[in-house]
């Protein structure tokens, strides 16, 4: 680490830059950059992320000592630019500070900002005197005690209790008959400050610190401590943010949006974060501090006139009313609006990306407090990239790399079924805070959301407002409905980041811990409700949803992905319908067609059971003959749906006991249906029982003990292909032998397949091209891949089984310990979701290298769940695979990930 721990900025100069995010955090790097490009930013300094790591290793005392001189110099520099004095005793205006966390990426799980730090009984008097605004001075003081008390000293409501500071406010408001916080007089606020101090003393067991330096060190250390709070850890886990990154601390001079009617604060976006529309937008509050907007306590006003008009239309507010009570910033402070509009354009031009900005107006002067590349919905992500590409702001590579593959999911996600929604009863309308459709059962707490979701229920989290404590519940819910909060409230911002449907500030609803009341009607936990996050509508009951269509910008992004990737993407599909869907999503072939699924449908299972019950080869052959036409028809359909593309068909894989019933009633039914005694069925089931079916009689072990099964399946495939070719299609079957560990196992199967194919060709008087290959899913197959490739024309890495066998984890039983392993940090990720590159990955690499050494044109692919997971797709690209294969709805994600891997 470098010796420099503190980077100052202010007055058009800065020691940091935008590209120093790793060291300064996103917020700090951009505060520096804004200074450098001439945007007005209050002076301050950033303590680096490396200091956070140092803090976690060496502890508080040692690190405070190490950075002390630099922090003191940072304060001195800030004092100079702002013409104020930290800990002023009357000689100058007191320097008050904001202390904010700021990791490399924005993290809603981190510490809340502390504003007005440096306030104490001396400072408040000087601020009152020098500003000539006593009310403002004491309002700032009481805000400071509240924030510092909560964030640094841990004074907040106990479980189920209201915030003790809020309780003081509410009590006085009620006693005085005030409508809002704005009605407090300076005298009221003086009293509140004293009461707040008493609250701190009682709850924290010590006095509120009056020494500004003690306050500052307390806040800085609280930021570092917040890196390791449970909610920050949860957020890091969900978003795959490494623990080593650490957070920076930004200490910055305060500017005051609460100085009166010529002051304001707000949040704005250079484009629409929900739809991607190129329309400046945002919200502001007059006479307020930033946290008022974010917390959704007062409902803010729109910044632009057009935004305000759209809001009025949604809300049924008349133009006269709008202008009188809810004017936009554009109308209320036109001069300032023009300045802000110029700054937002400058920032977007500079960063070539949509900016999410925070600003404060102090007595008519505009200050920018933050800018960052804005979070956006999947739809907005795609639209903005294509628009900016077409505007010439970014190139194709940037447009592709700017996509978050997993977010494409939102575009593939359901919307409400038109007919169902036409009949649905609209209960209320709120802000369209995060788009999409969601339906589920009402829950009122984040805990309940998690519990209900864990048992497979779809839930809608209904809250008065949300806070970072609700994060886990928000992840678990299908959608979120809040009583309060604007488009930039916590619920809205976080839901958009998660790609979850959210409706906020719904009209006429009231939410408690146990009930949701909408216009007099009460809904309880477990009642169904539906949300449309795109329009803000809230519906009664469960409303059917459908999948959206894909064209326009989505198609353009997919086209870019196509042109910039080396690997191609196949799909895992067992039915012509799935194959068709995947083809529409751009799949070029099938990487895994599981034939066993075909045996369960309708009365096919009976023919399968007949084969299983057969005493000998003759009996099995007779039963298989009945299955042949059915299988042929299946293969015909799938090969036709994927006409012209390779279709990898896996021979029967699961152990036979999966096809027989376990309970007495079903066994009796089976006996009756197949005309045998119940005992015969029971005996058979018993004989099929295995202690360890995953390692038992399955895969090619079936085909090698019952060759007639392989023979039937090979015949069905080849006959289907011949039929299609005759009809003018171009079938490309690839027959895949599962679960081999030795080349001999494959060799014996290959002989059966080739002999059968030759027979069919002779019978039909025609030939089709086909391949014989194998799945690499047993470590021994990877270790001896050179031998295996002597026979196999292709490998498909079955990374589900390969992961099971390499780790020795049964995937079906891993649920009991994997979550604990991840929580305890034994494993970083679930290896069944993201390919374990260091372990399992070695086997894949070895399989590729050895396989290609024996057969240079060996076709290589992967067909485990990993084929649709971006980090695994990148690994496959690096390893040189020809394709990845994944479930139909992951195909666009995998295509994008493949392009990104190629462009990085
Ligand atoms: P978050 O990361 O949650 O957005 P911030 O650190 O941006 O937290 O701060 C929250 C709010 O505090 C901001 O919206 C901003 O309005 C206000 N704020 C931060 N720094 C200052 C400052 N120097 N002067 C006035 N207000 C500030
Ligand atoms: Mg912020
Ligand atoms: Mg397998």
Image: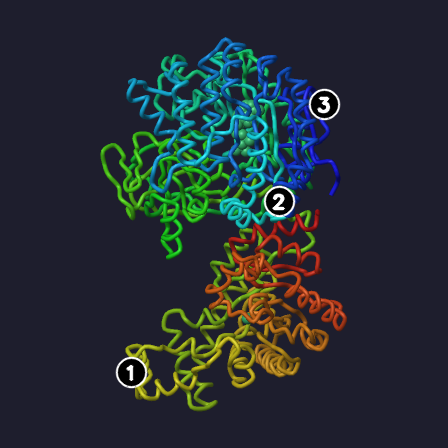
Spatial separation of the CA atoms under disc 2 and disc 3 = 32 Å
Q: Which residue is mark 3?
A: 13
Query: Which callout, 3 or 1, points to the residue nearer the camera?
Result: 3
Count of picture labels? 3
Secondary structure category for the residue under label 3: strand
Q: Residue at x 47, y 15 (%)?
A: 136
> Ligand 3 appears in which quadrant?
bottom right
CB of mark 2 within 8 Å of CB of mark 3? no
Check disc 1: other Cα within 10 Å, few if <14, some if 14-19, many if 20+: few
The residue pinned by badge 2 equals: 59
Is 763 in front, or is 179? 179
Q: Residues within 10 Å of mark 2 (few under 14, many from 20)?
A: few
Image quadrant containing the N terminus? top right
Near-viewer residue (188 or 405): 188
Q: Confirm whether residue 89 shows in the render.
A: yes
901 on left or right of 822: right
Other residues around mark 3 within 10 Å, as few (<14) / some (14–19) / many (≥20): some
Q: Residue at x 67, y 18 (%)?
A: 81
Q: Nearer the viewer, residue 568 or 533?
A: 533
Q: Is residue 81 above or below residue 628?
A: above
Q: Secondary structure at mark 2?
A: loop
For the residues labelled 3 and 1, the Cα–Cα distance comes to 88 Å
In this rendering, the answer to whether 590 lies above or below 661 is above
Q: Which mark is residue 672?
A: 1
Nearer the viewer's eye, disc 2 or disc 3?
2
Q: Tell me the distance, in whole angstroms, between the alpha carbons under discs 2 and 1.
A: 74 Å
- Residue name at image x 60 percent, y 23 percent: 253
Residue 867, percent from left and from top: 59, 58
Q: Position of residue 405 (x, y in %)?
A: 58, 47
What colour scheme was applied to this rendering of the protein? rainbow
Q: Percent x, y for residue 418?
A: 36, 42
Residue 171: image quadrant is top left
């Amino acid at each position: 680490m470098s010796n420099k721990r503190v980077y100052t900025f202010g007055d058009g100069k800065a020691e940091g830059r935008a590209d120093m995010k790793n060291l300064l955090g996103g917020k700090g790097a951009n505060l520096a950059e804004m200074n450098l490009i001439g945007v007005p930013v209050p002076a301050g300094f950033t303590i680096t992320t490396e200091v956070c790591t140092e803090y976690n290793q060496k502890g508080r005392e040692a690190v405070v000592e190490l950075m002390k001189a630099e922090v003191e110099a940072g304060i001195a520099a800030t004092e100079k630019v702002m013409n104020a004095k930290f800990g002023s005793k009357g000689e100058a205006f007191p320097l008050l500070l904001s202390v904010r966390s700021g990791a490399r990426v924005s993290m809603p799980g981190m510490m809340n900002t502390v504003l007005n730090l440096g306030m104490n009984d001396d400072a408040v008097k000087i601020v009152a005197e020098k500003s000539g605004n006593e009310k403002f001075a004491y309002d700032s003081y009481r805000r400071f005690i509240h924030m510092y008390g909560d964030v640094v000293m841990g004074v907040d409501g106990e479980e189920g209790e209201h915030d003790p500071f809020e309780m003081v406010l509410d009590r006085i408001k009620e006693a005085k008959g005030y409508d809002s916080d704005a009605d407090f007089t300076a005298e009221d606020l003086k009293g509140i400050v004293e009461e707040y101090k008493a609250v701190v003393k009682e709850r924290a067991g010590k006095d509120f610190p009056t020494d500004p330096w003690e306050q500052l060190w307390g806040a800085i250390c609280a930021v570092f401590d917040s890196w390791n709070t449970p909610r920050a850890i949860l957020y890091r886990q969900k978003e795959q943010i490494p623990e080593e990154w650490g957070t920076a601390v930004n200490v910055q001079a305060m500017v005051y949006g609460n100085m009166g009617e010529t002051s304001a604060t707000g949040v704005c976006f250079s484009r629409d974060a929900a739809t991607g529309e190129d329309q400046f937008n945002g919200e502001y509050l007059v006479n307020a501090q930033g946290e008022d907007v974010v917390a959704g306590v007062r409902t803010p006003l729109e910044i632009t006139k057009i935004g305000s008009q759209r809001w009025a239309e949604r809300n049924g507010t008349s133009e006269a009313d709008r202008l009188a009570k809810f004017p936009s910033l554009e109308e209320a402070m036109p001069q300032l609006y023009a300045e802000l509009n110029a700054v937002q354009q400058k920032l977007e031009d500079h960063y070539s990306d949509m900016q999410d900005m925070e600003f404060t107006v102090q007595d008519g002067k505009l200050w920018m407090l933050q800018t960052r590349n804005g979070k956006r919905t999947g739809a907005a992500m795609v639209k903005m990239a294509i628009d900016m590409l077409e505007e010439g702001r970014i190139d194709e590579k940037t447009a592709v790399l700017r996509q978050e593959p997993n977010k494409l999911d939102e575009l593939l996600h359901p919307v409400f079924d038109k007919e169902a929604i036409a009949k649905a009863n609209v209960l209320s309308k709120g802000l369209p805070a995060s788009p999409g459709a969601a339906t589920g059962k009402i829950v009122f707490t984040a805990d309940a959301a998690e519990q209900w979701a864990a048992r497979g229920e779809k839930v809608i989290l209904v809250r008065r407002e949300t806070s970072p404590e609700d994060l886990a519940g928000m992840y678990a819910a299908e959608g979120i409905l809040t009583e309060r909060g604007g488009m930039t409230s916590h619920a809205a911002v976080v839901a958009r980041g998660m790609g979850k449907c959210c409706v906020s500030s719904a009209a006429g609803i009231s939410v408690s811990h146990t009930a949701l009341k909408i216009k007099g009607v009460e809904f309880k936990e477990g009642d169904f409700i539906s949300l449309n996050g795109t329009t803000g509508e809230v519906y009664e009951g469960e409303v059917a949803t459908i999948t959206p269509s894909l064209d326009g910008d989505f198609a353009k992004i997919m086209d870019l992905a196509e042109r910039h990737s080396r690997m191609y993407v196949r799909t895992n599909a067992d039915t012509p319908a799935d194959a068709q869907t995947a083809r529409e999503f751009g799949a070029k072939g099938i990487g895994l067609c599981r034939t066993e699924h075909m045996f369960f449908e309708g009365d096919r299972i009976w023919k399968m059971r007949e084969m299983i019950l057969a005493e000998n080869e003759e009996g099995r052959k007779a039963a298989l003959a009945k299955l042949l036409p059915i299988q042929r028809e299946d293969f015909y359909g799938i090969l036709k749906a994927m006409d012209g593309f390779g279709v990898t068909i896996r021979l029967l894989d699961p152990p036979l006991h999966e096809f027989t019933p376990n309970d007495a009633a079903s066994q009796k039914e089976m006996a009756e249906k197949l005309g045998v005694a119940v005992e015969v069925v029971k005996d058979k089931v018993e004989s099929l029982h295995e202690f360890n079916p995953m390692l038992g009689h399955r895969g090619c072990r079936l085909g090698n003990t019952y060759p007639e099964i392989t023979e039937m399946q090979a015949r069905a495939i080849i006959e289907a292909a011949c039929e299609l070719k005759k009809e003018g299609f171009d079938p490309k079957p690839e027959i895949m032998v599962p679960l081999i560990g030795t080349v001999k196992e494959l060799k014996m199967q290959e002989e059966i397949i080739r002999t059968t194919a030759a027979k069919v060709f002779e019978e039909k008087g025609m030939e089709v091209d086909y391949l014989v290959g194998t799945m690499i899913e047993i470590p021994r197959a990877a270790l001896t891949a050179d031998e295996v490739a002597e026979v196999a024309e292709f490998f498909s890495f079955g990374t589900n089984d390969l992961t099971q066998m390499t780790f020795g984890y049964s995937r079906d039983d891993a649920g009991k310990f994997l979550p604990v392993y991840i929580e305890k940090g034994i494993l970083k990720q679930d290896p069944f979701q993201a390919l374990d590159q260091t372990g399992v990955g070695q086997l894949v690499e070895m399989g590729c290298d050895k396989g290609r050494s024996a057969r240079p044109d060996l076709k290589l692919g992967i067909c485990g769940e990993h084929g649709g997971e971006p980090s695994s797709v990148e690994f496959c690209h690096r390893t040189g695979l020809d394709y990845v294969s994944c479930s139909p709805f992951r195909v666009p994600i995998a295509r994008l990930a493949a392009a990104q891997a190629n462009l990085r």
